[in-house]
């Protein structure tokens, strides 16, 4: 079986998308490190977060009129052949949004999420009004789009904002979706609250870049934020939410804090120790 190289149907300078796929081993090599990709069976989602197209609907006509708005390309495999099927854009797309800095795809490829790192709206919650003309604010609070596929068509199902939107929080910088597509974990690794545990004080900004994770769940077509998640030993610059994973049913969540400083070893060690700068840590949560 030969290798396949995927390129978007329309590509402009600085799109920063490039993938090489070896189907034999399902091994992916990023030709340009600023690309993002995710495979679900015969569906592949790959983003170019510096892409500059102006459409605000899936499969609009590509151009280069909104520099840095970002895009997700969806490829489909039939037999040994890959083809681009979709060009996916958000309904509130603006220049310099950086949509696609993270992507997540459900197990059957029917639910797609994309983080919008530099989205600037100060609104909170699910599907807030506005957020389509705030580029000049330059706040990089972040957002997430969710689309669902029915047949050959993608429809935007939700536009998600944090419950405590803040400047430079980077909400959406990391994503994980459950296999069934009904739970979505959203990282904001530069969020500043010093809260600890689940659903703590969100309007506190005394823990600079401590990081946070937001858990959303879907019932029918409706998405709701279920939890605001912090580490048990939150400190500034921990960057909790710098990576995460969800189980297939969404009931088990693992979150990393790349900048956590404890020199503890193994499971449930001394969390109060700060003798190993940026050693990192992982936290496991369950919802039974």
Image (tube, grey):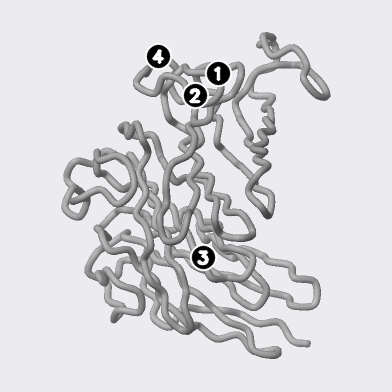
Instruction: Please tell me whether mark 1 sits on a helix, a strand or a loop.
Output: loop
Mark toward the start of the polypeptide (4 vs 1): 4
The part of the image, by quadrant, that contains residue 61 is bottom left
Q: Which residue is mark 3?
A: 111
Q: Residue at x 67, y 38 (%)?
A: 288
Sooner in the amino-acid sequence: mark 2 or mark 3: 3
Badge 4 marks a residue whose secondary structure is loop
Residue at position x 52%, y 46% in the image:
174
Going by the image, does 122 lie left or right of 250?
Answer: left
At 54% from the left and 78% from the top, the residue drawn is: 75
Name the residue tied to disc 2. Answer: 210
Nearer the N terminus, badge 1 or badge 2?
A: 2
| 86 sits left or right of 166 in the view | right
* Chain-order first, disc 4 or disc 3: 3
Q: Give neighbour class at mark 4: few <14, some 14-19, many 20+ (Cα, 10 Å).
A: few
Label 3 or label 1, whichever comes before in sequence order: 3
Residue that label 4 marks? 206
């Amino acid at each position: 079986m030969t290798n396949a190289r995927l390129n978007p149907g329309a590509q402009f300078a600085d799109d920063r998308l490039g993938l090489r796929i070896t189907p034999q081993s399902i091994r992916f090599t990023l030709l340009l490190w600023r690309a993002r990709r995710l495979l679900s069976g015969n569906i592949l989602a790959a983003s170019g977060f510096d892409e500059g197209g102006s459409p605000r609907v899936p499969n609009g006509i590509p151009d280069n009129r909104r520099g840095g708005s970002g895009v997700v390309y969806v490829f489909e495999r039939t037999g040994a052949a890959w083809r681009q099927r979709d060009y996916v854009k958000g309904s509130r797309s603006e220049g310099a949004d950086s949509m696609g800095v993270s992507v997540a795809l459900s197990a059957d490829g029917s639910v797609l999420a994309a983080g919008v790192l530099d989205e600037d709206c100060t609104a909170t919650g699910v599907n807030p009004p506005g957020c389509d003309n705030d580029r000049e604010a330059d706040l990089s609070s972040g957002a997430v789009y969710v689309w669902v596929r029915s047949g050959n068509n993608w429809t935007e199902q939700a536009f998600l904002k944090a419950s405590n939107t803040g400047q430079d929080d980077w909400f959406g910088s990391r994503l994980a979706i459950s296999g069934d597509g009904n739970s979505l974990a959203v990282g904001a690794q530069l969020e500043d609250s010093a809260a600890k545990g689940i659903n703590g004080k969100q309007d506190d900004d005394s823990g600079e870049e401590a990081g946070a994770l937001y858990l959303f769940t879907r019932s029918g077509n409706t998405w709701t934020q279920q939890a605001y998640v912090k580490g048990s030993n939150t400190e500034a610059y921990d960057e909790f939410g710098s990576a995460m994973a969800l189980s297939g049913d969404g009931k088990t969540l693992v979150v990393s804090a790349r900048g956590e400083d404890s020199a503890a070893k193994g499971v449930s060690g001394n969390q109060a120790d700060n003798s190993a700068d940026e050693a990192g840590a992982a936290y496991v949560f369950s919802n039974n």
